[in-house]
Image: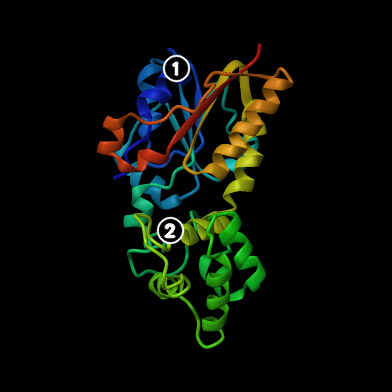
Amino acid sequence: MHIPVLLKEVIANLNPKPNENFVDCTFGFGGHAVAILEKTGPNGKVLGVEWDREKLKIKNEKLKIDRLVLINDSYANLREIVERENFGPINGVLLDLGISSWDFENSGRGFSFQKDEPLDMRYSEKQLLTAKEIINKWPEEELERIFREYGQERFAKNIASNIVKIRRQKLIGTTFQLVEIIKKSFPKSYKFGKIHVATRTFQALRIAVNNELENLKNVLPQALEVLEKGGRVAVISFHSLEDSIVKKFFKTQAQNNNLQILTKKPVVASAIEIKENPKARSAKLRVAQLNN
């Protein structure tokens, strides 16, 4: 099951106090939210927003807390959700942008290149676009762009070209089909390292399917709008594209005297946490406080 990343660091930097209210924009399985609730009794509440209905169903069966409000929606709609639920005042907003272990191991949606599953990669069944549609219908130039831009894949051109060649012959519908194409797109002389050759391509597809970078750009200003003065926003990112967006947003808002940046450098996981949860290795936490 999903282990919340940088849990102690999130609590220390959000600094939840009794009777304060928080929004967990990426509720997942509730690890961060439960820890916040432990600090905000007796009356503090958490609004948990989760795009994946199945995760909420799993968690609802095990988690019964009166002070927790769970909503099945995208955090890109944060302002609308807060208004609709009449939730507030809000003292902190958290975004954990990492994909959970459950998505890789149990969702059956093709997030993992180590399982032979349909090329789906949607966080929510409400979405129309799937990885299968991108792979089989998007122009070669657009495939190359997302692999290069979102996955930072140096062999993006080869991969896109080979995908187009194969899809002219047959539909590409599963993860293993795609992995084979990716493997053949690398030069024979290429020395394979610790990172699987499909890692960057799969990351790029997931980002494109779920519109992750645009959603992040959209939610950050909304987080400031819903926060009380002195409230804090914390964001955990897992790759440089996300971290760059957060860093730039915080810097711009600080220059405009809207925010005070509390983490001059991103907070990273300890060696002990990385040993217990290797996924934490790439996590970066940035926190800022809304000026009074």
SS category of the residue bearing label 1: loop
Q: Which residue lies furthest to the bottom in this view?
A: 169
* Of 98 and 163, the residue lying toward us: 163
Q: Is mark 2 on a helix, strand or loop?
A: helix
Residue closest to the eye, 256 or 275: 275
The amino acid type of the residue labelled 2 equals Thr
Percent of width and height locating residue 5: 37, 35
Q: In which quarter of the image is residue 41?
A: top left
Structural distance between the alpha carbons of marks 2 and 1 = 36 Å
User: Residue, x 49% and y 61% (percent of image)?
Assistant: 201
Q: Work out which residue is located at the far front of the displayed protein and give it.
A: 189
Q: Can residue 255 be seen here?
A: yes
Circles 2 and 1, Cβ within 8 Å, touching? The answer is: no
Point out residue 67 in the picture as x, y percentages from the top left corner: 42, 26
Q: State the residue position of label 1.
A: 16
2 or 1: tag closer to the N-terminus: 1
Position of residue 259 relative to residue 130, above or below, is: above
110 relative to 243, above or below: below
- Residue drawn at the location 65% of the way across and 66% of the way down: 142
Q: Is residue 274 left or right of residue 177?
A: left
Colouring chosen for the image of the structure: rainbow
The residue to which callout 2 is attached is: 199
- Among all residues in the image, which is located at the extreme right? 256
Image coordinates of residue 95 in percent, x first then y, are: 51, 35
Which of the numbered marks, if any, corresponds to residue 161? none
Q: Nearer the viewer, residue 190 or 150?
A: 190
In-image side of 6 versus 206 (left or right): left
- Image coordinates of residue 169 in percent, x first then y, are 52, 88
Q: How crowded is mark 1: few (under 14 residues within 10 Å), some or many (20 or more)?
A: many
Kind of residue at badge 1 = Pro
